[in-house]
Image (cartoon, grey):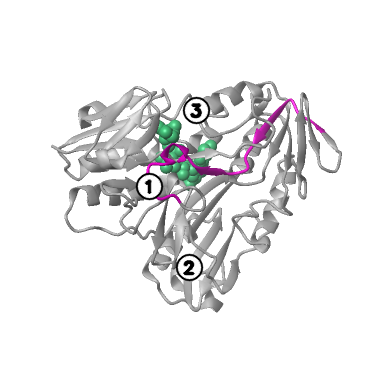
Amino acid sequence: GRRVVVVGAGMAGVQTAVALREQGFRGTITLVGAEPHRPYDRPPLSKAVLLGKAEGSAFEVDFESLGIALDLGREALGVRPAEHELDTAAGPVPYDVLVLATGAEPIRLPGTEGVPGVHLLRTLDDAQRLRPVLARQHDIVVVGAGWIGAEFATAAREAGCAVTVVEAADRPLAGALPAEVAAPMTAWYADSGAELRTHARVASVEPGAVVLADGSRLPAGAVVVGIGARPATGWLAGSGIELGADREVVADAYLRASVPDVYAVGDCASFPSARYGERLLVHHWDNALQGPRTVAANIIGDTPTGYDPVPYFWSEQFGRFVQYVGHHPAADTLLWRGDPLGPAWTVCWLRADRLVALLAVGRPRDLAQGRRLIEAGTPMAPELLADPARPLKEA
Ligand code: FAD
C-alpha cells in the first residue's frame, strides 16, 4: 500500500490521518510530531486547561485501532521532494504522499528571548507553565489585545490576578476587525477589571517590570506575549516547496503544495479562495478540521476536490461567546443587529444584497443562520436584517 506521512501532530495532522481512514484509505499512515505529548487540542489551553478546570485536552482518537502510527518527539528538519524523503533528527522517513501540517508558532517580543517570567501561549507546556503563575495571583502584563491576549486576560482575571493589557494599536483586535466593530469590545476589558492600554509600545522587559516607550513602568510578576503567530515552516527552507509572503506553504485550490505528492493544510498553509477572490491564510480551528477532509479525499480519489470554505471561528472572552463566519474585507455595507453596548449583538457585512460575513456576540442562532445564508449566497433585505427580533433567515 501507499505510505502517507503527515508532519505535525496537531489538529490538522490528526484530522488528516483520521479522515484518510474514514474515507477508506488502506495504506500506512505515520504521524510525525515534534512535541512529546499525545496529540491535543489547542483552544482549551487558553480556557479550561489554563484555569485548571481540565487537566489536558488530548484528542479522543484511538490511533492504534485506526492503524495510525504515532512518531512523537520527532522534529522534521527538511524534505527532499525528488527522493520522496522527509529528514528528521532520527533519520530519513520515506513517503509516497507527504502532508505538511506543522501549524504556526507564536511571534516573540524582540529582546525577550530567555528572559525569565516572559511567557507565550501556544503549547500544552506553555499552559502548564502558566497555571502556577495564575495561582500565585501575580500582577500580569499581557502584550497584545488580540484573540489570545483577550482570552488569557479573561482567565487571569478569573484567577484573581491584576491584569494590564498593552496594545500598540488604538484598539483591541486591530488586525482582525474594523474600528467600529472593535469599539464596544474596549469596554469589556474594564468591565472585567483588566486595564487596557492602547497606543502602548513595549520598550523593554526588566525583572519584575515592563517598560513602555513613553517611560512608564508596569509592575509585572509575569508577562504573557500574544502578538500573533506565523507558519512553522522554517524547516522547509531550501526544500524547493514554495513559501508565501507570510512564510506559509503556498497551496493550490486542492491543498497541494508546489511539488508533487505533497499537500499542506491548517495554520501552516494558504489557499486561493474563489469565493472571496483572494488567497487566505486562516489561523483557526475550523480550517484545521475542514481542510483535512479535502486533503484525504484528494490523496485517495482520482478527481481532485477543491477547498473553498466559508471560514469560521469562535472566541470566549470576558464572559462572552464571540463567533465570526465569512470574510469581510470585500464588503460594502456594515449593519448592526442589536445594541453594541448590550450583552448580545451581531454585525452583518454585506456586498450588494448578499451577506458575506457576520460577527455574533452571544447570538449563536444568528451565527448558525448566517453561516447558511453566506454559504448559499441568498439575497437579503438589509432593512429587515437590522431588526434583532426578526430571525436572520427571514430577512
Ligand atoms: P497546530 O495546532 O499548531 O499543530 C502543529 C503541530 O506541528 C504542533 O504540535 C507542532 O509542535 C508540530 N510541528 C511544528 N513544526 C514541526 C516540525 N518541524 N516537525 C514536527 N512537528 C512539528 N481557534 C479557534 O477557532 N477558536 C479558538 O477559541 C481558538 N483558541 C486557541 C487558543 C490557543 C491557546 C491557541 C494556541 C490557538 C487557538 N485557536 C483557536 C487556533 C487553533 O487552535 C489553530 O488554528 C489550530 O490548532 C491549527 O491546527 P494545526 O494542526 O494547523 O496547527
N-terminal-most mark, 2 or 1: 1
Q: Which residue is mark 3?
A: 124
| Residue type beneath disc 1 | Ile
Determine the CA span between mark 2 and mark 1.
Answer: 33 Å
- Marks 3/1 in contact by CB < 8 Å: the verdict is no
In x, y percent, where is residue 17? 28, 38
- Which residue carries the number 1 mark? 241
Q: Secondary structure at mark 2?
A: strand
**Please, what is the three-letter code of the amino acid marked with disc 2?**
Val
Circle 2 packing at 10 Å, graded few (<14), some (14-19), many (20+), is many
Residue 289 colored in magenta in the image? no
The quarter holding residue 190 reads top right
Residue 296's spot in the image, x, y percent?
25, 47
Specify the amino acid type for callout 3: Leu
Task: Give the spatial CA distance, label 2 vs label 3.
Answer: 35 Å
What residue appears at the point 37 percent right and 32 percent down from the top-left corner? 59
Residue at x 31%, y 34% (from the top left corner) = 86
Decide which of tag 2 and tag 3 comes sooner along the chain. 3
Does the rendering let one see residue 5?
yes
Helix, strand or loop at mark 3: helix
Residue under circle 2?
Answer: 356
Nearest the eye: 127 or 260: 260
Compared with 304, 221 (above or below) is: above
Magenta-tinted stretch: 218-243
